[in-house]
Amino acid sequence: MTRMTKGRPIPLVDLGSAHELIAEEVREGFERVFATTGFVGGPEVTAFEDEYAAYSGVRHCVGVGNGTDALELAMRAAGVRRDDEVVLPANTFIATAEAVVRAGARPVLVDCDPATYLLDVDAALGAVGPRTAAVVPVHLYGQHAPVEQLAEKLAASGTRIVEDAAQCQGASRHGRGAGADTEALTGAVAATSFYPGKNLGAYGDGGAVLTDDAELAATVRTLSNHGGLAKYRHDLVGVNSRLDALQAVVLRAKLRRLPAWNTARRAAAARYDALLADVEGVVCPFRDPGNLHVWHLYVVRLDVFEGDSSRRDALIDRLAAEGIATGIHYPTPVHLTPAFAHLGYSRGAFPNAEAASARILSLPLHPHLTEGDQERIVSALAAAIR
């Protein structure tokens, strides 16, 4: 028998409310595309690429089919080749490691910072060796990894930095957005995802590569279009990964609202901080200094359960029975997934990532979350851990 929920359901992500705000714009945009039948590429895609590049503070944006493709193509364009090594954090979505393998390289995993869960810079630098072609800092949960610290050490080594920016649309660090050059980071490149649940999400899959490097952008565009920019001309062995015009329509409509939506996310995160301040055993997220956070996720740490994930699972079920959706980002570090067992890492290899995976919990966070919703969430959470 299904238990009745108390109050209306509170989703982890509210895509319906977002659609209501842009439905008419999307309808009009779809009609423009239907009228021209330009479903792949065309003026809507070009306009979105220009607009998102300007918003992100970079010179070039190349739309592709999804975020995983974006990361693979960014690495290939940056010079990652078969049998190279690529350093990345163990606590990331599996797509980061998948993209490395698809580029022909071997993932070399490192631990995370125990407070932010971002890439441990010292561990990453310590893992760089003669076969390392790139380091992939993951901008996790809506804030940037400390790319400038990596850049300072890697500037003279030839090791590229390829940023995984799938969760940070609109975020910046010391005023720099993903994929933008700094003095120490020439040829910077970042990959992002427009999966529907992202801060800037499409109505299906989509992704993009961001860079100030014109040559690198041209290579990504070539690779994503079967290895050529002219019909039946194939200069490289590429793939079929192009952003379609209908998704570009949706993304353009949402991009116009993204600054306001990110502001609403920051306000909601601040309310959570205040509401959770007196809830014993719940640790609020840590903001790394210098970051403009966009709160793709609000991830608390449940120290009250001392890493007993079965008690966390019971809490998740109890909140679900109250109509409150939650998530875990991510329950299994990359090195403990069956898909990457061949890398040879064992349990205990990355203690910070493993400890986090057993304690973290993502609470509902989106631009349409009300103060009343958050009070109800925190009240239910506090009751469930007593």
Image (cartoon, rainbow, N blue to C red):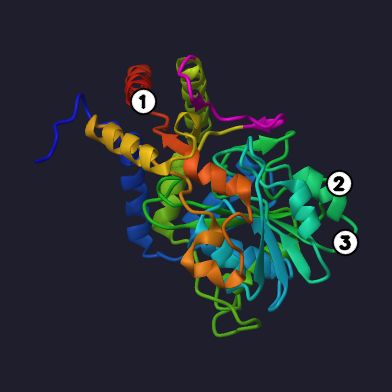
Magenta segment: 278-292
Q: Are marks 1 and 3 in contact (CB under 8 Å)?
A: no
Q: Residue at x 43, y 44 (%)?
A: 328
How packed mark 1 is, by other alpha carbons closer than 10 Å (few <14, some 14-19, many 20 or more), is: many
**What is the three-letter code of the residue carrying label 2?**
Glu
Residue shown at the point (53%, 31%) measured from the top left: 259
Q: Which residue is mark 3?
A: 157
Q: Report how far apart the C-alphas of labels 1 and 2 lie in the structure.
A: 46 Å
Q: Eyeballing the image, is 100 above or below 377?
A: below
Q: Secondary structure at mark 2?
A: loop
Is 373 positioned to the left or the right of 3 in the image? right
Residue type for callout 3: Ser
Q: Residue at x 62, y 45 (%)?
A: 352
Of badges 3 and 2, the one in the foreground is 3
Q: Position of residue 333 (x, y in %)?
A: 53, 54
Instruction: Measuring from the top left, give residue 198's x and y in whole percent.
Output: 46, 45
Residue 5 counted in the magenta span: no
Q: Earlier in the sequence, mark 3 or mark 2?
A: 3
Residue type marked 1? Leu
Residue at label 1?
381
Q: Residue furthest left?
A: 1
State the CA–CA distance, disc 1 to disc 3: 48 Å
Secondary structure under the numbered disc 1 in the rendered image: helix
Mark 2: few, some, or many residues within 10 Å (few <14, many ≥20)? few
**Secondary structure state at the residue bearing disc 3:** loop
